[in-house]
Image (cartoon, coloured by chain):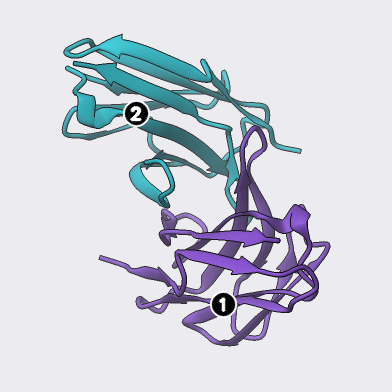
Chain colours: A purple, B cyan
């Protein structure tokens, strides 16, 4: 089975810190995605990537950036963390668009 | 812009009951529809994937159907168990676009 690994289950960071959320998949998937999930708002797409060094903005990219230097790794960067970025962050991957997505276990980020 | 709606938002049923969860989407030109399960505080687990040429998929006690013309999918759970308690999410995409999610149905199965 494909495994998508998010490096941290829980993180607590201070306002203004630069935060890195890491996601690694082990099945040579082309496509990788970052979503955030908030009560009442559901899952919202932040950024996605269809290839190494490629990135596309999702619905809510403000305050975030991403890096994909290797095919298996897709990092989400909070340039200057703010309290409104407290959320559950979910990474997913798929080999092609017409295949199913596999999600990681999520990172619960709290910004204080 | 694609919108996905799941009704009801929450559902409570006694153990052993058969139940149906509903998902509707506004743009019927979808490519895939995928059902997920999410336990509290956890990531999403894929349950069933219906690709564009398919109309239903089955896995164990779960059956998902897709009617693109009406913009609807249903997830049928047979003989529900307390372990089925979770939030169920449906998501769709069109062509080479990312999945768009509904807000989910929170299911409680009471023993």
Where residue B53 appears, as percent x and y from the top left, is 42, 40
Q: Bin the neighbour count of mark 1 within 10 Å (Cα to Cα): few under 14, some 14-19, many 20 and up.
A: many
Which image quadrant for residue A99?
bottom left
Is residue A97 rendered to the left or right of residue B4? left
Mark 1 belongs to which subunit?
A
User: Residue, x 77% and y 53% (percent of image)?
Assistant: A84
Q: Secondary structure at mark 1?
A: strand
Q: Is residue B95 above or below residue B69?
A: below
Residue farthest to the right? Answer: A62
Which quarter of the rendering shows the C terminus of chain A?
bottom right
Where residue B94 appears, as percent x and y from the top left, is 61, 46
Numbered tag placed on residue B64 in the rendering: 2
Q: Bin the neighbour count of mark 2 within 10 Å (Cα to Cα): few under 14, some 14-19, many 20 and up.
A: many
The front one of B30 and A42 is A42
Residue at which label 1 appears = A74
Is residue A81 rendered to the left or right of residue B34? right
Residue farthest to the bottom? Answer: A69
Q: Secondary structure at mark 2?
A: strand
Which quarter of the rendering shows the N terminus of chain A?
bottom left
Where residue A45 appears, as percent x and y from the top left, is 67, 54
User: Residue, x 31% and y 11% (percent of image)?
Assistant: B13
User: What whole-number distance in Å separates the C-alpha atoms at marks 1 and 2?
Assistant: 31 Å
* Label 1 vs label 2, nearer the camera: 1
Q: Is residue A31 above or below residue A110?
A: below
Which image quadrant for residue B102?
top right
The front one of B3 and A36 is A36
**Quick check: do tags 1 and 2 share a chain?**
no
Mark 2 belongs to which subunit?
B
User: Residue, x 53% and y 69% (percent of image)?
Assistant: A31
Q: Is residue A66 above or below residue B25?
A: below
User: Residue, x 67% and y 37% (percent of image)?
Assistant: A41
């Amino acid at each position: 089975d494909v495994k998508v690994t998010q490096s941290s289950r829980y993180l607590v960071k201070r306002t203004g810190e630069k935060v890195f959320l890491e996601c690694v998949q082990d099945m040579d998937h082309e496509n990788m995605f970052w979503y955030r999930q908030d009560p009442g708002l559901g899952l919202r797409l932040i950024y996605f990537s269809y290839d190494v060094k490629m990135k596309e903005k999702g619905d809510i990219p403000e305050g975030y950036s991403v890096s994909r230097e290797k095919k298996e790794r897709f990092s989400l960067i909070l340039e200057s963390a703010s309290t409104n970025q407290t959320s559950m962050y979910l990474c997913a991957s798929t080999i092609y668009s017409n295949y199913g997505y596999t999600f990681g276990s999520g990172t619960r980020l709290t910004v204080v | 812009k694609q919108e996905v709606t799941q009704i009801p938002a929450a559902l409570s049923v006694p153990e052993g009951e058969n139940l149906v969860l509903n998902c509707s989407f506004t743009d019927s030109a979808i490519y895939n529809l995928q059902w997920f399960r999410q336990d509290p505080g956890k990531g999403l687990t894929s349950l069933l994937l219906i690709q564009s040429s398919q109309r239903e998929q089955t896995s164990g006690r779960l059956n998902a159907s897709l009617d693109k013309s009406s913009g609807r999918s249903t997830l049928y759970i047979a003989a529900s168990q307390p372990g089925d308690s979770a939030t169920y999410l449906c998501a769709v995409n069109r062509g080479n676009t990312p999945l768009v999610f509904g807000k989910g149905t929170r299911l409680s199965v009471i023993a």
